[in-house]
Image (cartoon, rainbow, N blue to C red):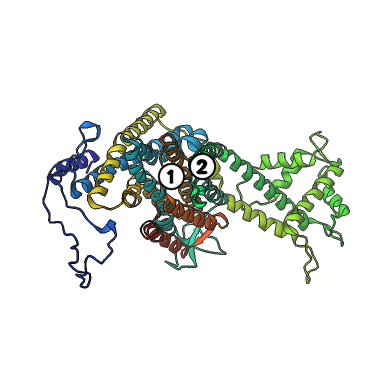
Amino acid sequence: MAPQRLLLVFIFLFYFSSFPSNARFIAGRSSPTDLVSDGISTVKTPPYLLLKPLVAAEETCEQTYGFLPCTTTVVGNLFLILVYGYLMFLAATYLSNGSELLLEILGPGIVGGLFLPILGALPDAMLILVSGLSGTSETAQDQVSVGMGLLAGSTVMLLTVIWGSCVVVGRCDLRDSFAVDGTNTKGFHLTETGVSTDIWTCYAARIMAISVIPFVVVQLPQALNSTSGRHLAVLIALIISVSMLVSYCVYQVFQPWIQRRRLAFVKHKHVISGILRHLKKQAFGKLLTEDGEPNTEIIRKLFDAIDENGNGSLSYSELKALVIGIRFEEIDLDKDDAVRKVMADFDTSLDSVVQEDEFVKGITKWINEAKQTGGAYLEPTAGTFKFIDRFHQETKREHALLGSEEQSDEVVEHVENPRWISFKAVLMLLLGTLIAAAFADPLVDAVDNFSDATSIPSFFISFIALPLATNSSEAVSAIIFATRKKQRTASLTFSELYGAVTMNNVLCLSVFLALVYVRGLTWDFSSEVLVILIVCIVMGAFASFRTTFPLWTCSIAYILYPFSLALVYVLDYYFGWS
């Protein structure tokens, strides 16, 4: 069914569901005597579990914008939350699809690094903004808990339910602690199936863990039981959060360039290890002396073997013949680029040829680098040094961690009718932004009214329900992407999850802190901040130092979600944290 028809059905049903209805309100009776208990008045019932009447005739509601429907009934407000939540889901979908279309036209860099993360966090930011702008300061203080609930709920949902689901659907067979693309012959084996990511995903997880610093700063006065420095702490946290937002966007803009440079460096190390292994096989003796130093005599003999015309120097064509003669099966190597880099390493005199002394110095430098990486140790049985093989294996591992060339390639493929795609992308971005801006305030009002009607704190409603609306499209696309069962897609999936949480911690928090500071609101969200810190630090530390996640790791993520909800409930009700 089309979204427009669904919306019409929602509105039609709403007007029937929001008519007043009567219900009996059951309340506890006071005990007539202190000696006899009726079993009701002595029971301490959490206010969250007390439902008010489904409708109170004397209560009225205020229409958002003066014309949007409102109600004081539980069913009516629940239905409004579903309708407005669906509209926010549409807004997030339009923003996501428009961003992807724009990325096809303009490629990464400014678009992928700056606009896409901001647009992805826009629905959450809009909801947080309107939650603190409504009415008087007292009203804003009451409704701002919706924004904090959404902020905490989005972070927890992305790093628990969605993270764990991506591990489950993206699992592959593990071989040598690394996931083999496209293979799943072991079913749901907890230790022999899982997903692997590249090193850039680890960096994204570390950045996410660092992004919780503003939460720590703003929470310090409460941790120290100080009331005088809370407003100043909010300002300092706001400055830090905005600074981290700018720094993160700059990093995202330049990250593809950094990734290409790292890959180019590792490919050059592949050439070095390949040439050293080739020379070792062709050597007329050992490349190292008994004391572990490069054997210059053997290196000079190797030079003579490569110098085909015997003129005492190696030309570009002779070096290219050497590179072509070596099979680099692990990488897609540009032979001409490899020869140019070898020439740049050896040709210190810049005369476009490599003299014998330059060759000896260059090979000696490569051998010393290989010894530092591979460790020049002596095999007790063979009596030969194995550092070159170790250097080669370490280079292969480093290249695998950096990911494939496809992931770092910034070349934008030719698209048909770019003007139409650009127009469509801008239209979808504008439509998504308008829907998010128009219906964020009504959604917050509906959550607040539902909270009043049920006595359930608005925080819990926004913690559980609103992230489903604002993050649904992102969650579905992440899970679908993970089902491709490749390291590249797994890396992109988890990087996007960590990036979304980072934007929550810097962009959405910046909006929230600005509201608290400008409107003079009270920062009193200790339990919520604690939950965000626990989830971000646990998952950030877990993902920062490993690139392979066996299937059993999803259980940690799944356990964290109910733990977070229970922790907020216990701290809020039993210990008075809010």
Q: Amino acid at mark 1?
A: Trp
- Counting residues from the N terminus, which is met first, the one under dot 2 or under dot 1? 2
Give residue 515's position: percent from left, percent from top: 41, 37
Looking at the rendered structure, which numbered label has been put on residue 233?
A: 2
Give residue 165's position: percent from left, percent from top: 40, 57
Label 1 Cα neighbours within 10 Å, binned few <14 / some 14-19 / many ≥20: some
Nearer to me, 101 or 426: 426
The single residue placed furthest to the top in the displayed view is 419
Residue at numbered disc 1: 523
Give residue 66's position: percent from left, percent from top: 21, 31
Residue at 80%, 38% (x, y): give it. 347
The single residue placed furthest to the right in the displayed view is 297
Nearer to me, 244 or 298: 244
Nearer to me, 491 or 395: 491
Q: In the figure, residue 131 lies in which quadrant?
A: top left
Give residue 106's position: percent from left, percent from top: 47, 32
